[in-house]
Amino acid sequence: MAPGEIPGADADLGLDLSSDIQGILTALQQVRKKAKTDGQKKNEEILNSVKSDILSLADEAKLKSDKERQTLLKAATKLAKECEASLKAEATKYQSIYEKFCKEREDHLRSYEDTFSKFEEGKEALLTRLEQQRKKEKTLVSDLQKSCSDKIAAAEEQVKKKSQEDKSFTMLRKTLGSFFEDIED
């Protein structure tokens, strides 16, 4: 049995039916192609519509952006002119102050040098006094050390003497103690 044949039908009927089915299949394919073509046309129409909407939006955005740029450019130009005028005024003030400073600078430098000179003289006098004070302190410390050494030596001598006296006294007591013991016996 061939594809497209109906089982149990006669061969003529089968051929007619087969050609009818083939015709129907061909018609369905044409309908499908047409639907596909119509779908593509519809998609193209949608895409073209979206494309024109996007281009329109882009043109509007560009116009708006150009207007905003022009507004910003005008504002920047105005600000630059104001800034330039302000800078010129400040430069004039600065020049005036600078010239005044230059005139007074010599007086200030002279005053500075006088002050520095007085400071140096005062510093030298203080250094001299400091050196004298150090010498006095060294002498005082040396004298104090000598005095302390003498007192320590005298104290050691007294302790030594007392220690010898204590030993002599202990010896005397022992001697007297043994003497009295001998007398009692």
Image: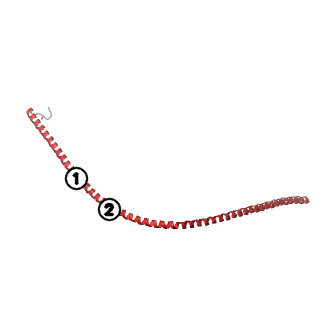
**Residue 14 % position (x, y):** 10, 34
Pointer 1 with pointer 2, Cβ within 8 A? no
Q: Nearer the viewer, residue 168 or 67?
A: 67
**Residue 31 % position (x, y):** 14, 43
Quadrant that contains the N terminus: top left
Mark carried by residue 181: none
In the picture of the structure, the residue carrying the numbered disc 2 is 74
Quadrant that contains the C terminus: bottom right
Q: Helix, strand or loop at disc 1?
A: helix
In the picture of the structure, the residue carrying the numbered disc 1 is 52
Asked which quadrant contains residue 131, the reply is: bottom right
How many other residues sit within 10 Å of disc 1, few (<14), some (14-19) or many (≥20)?
few
Q: Nearer the viewer, residue 47 or 57?
A: 57
Disc 1 residue type (three-letter) = Ser
Disc 2 residue type (three-letter) = Lys
55 vs 6, left or right, is right
Pointer 1 or 2: first along the chain:
1
Asked which quadrant contains residue 17, the reply is: top left
Q: How many marks?
A: 2
97 vs 20, left or right, is right
Disc 1 to disc 2, C-alpha distance = 33 Å
Q: Helix, strand or loop at disc 2?
A: helix
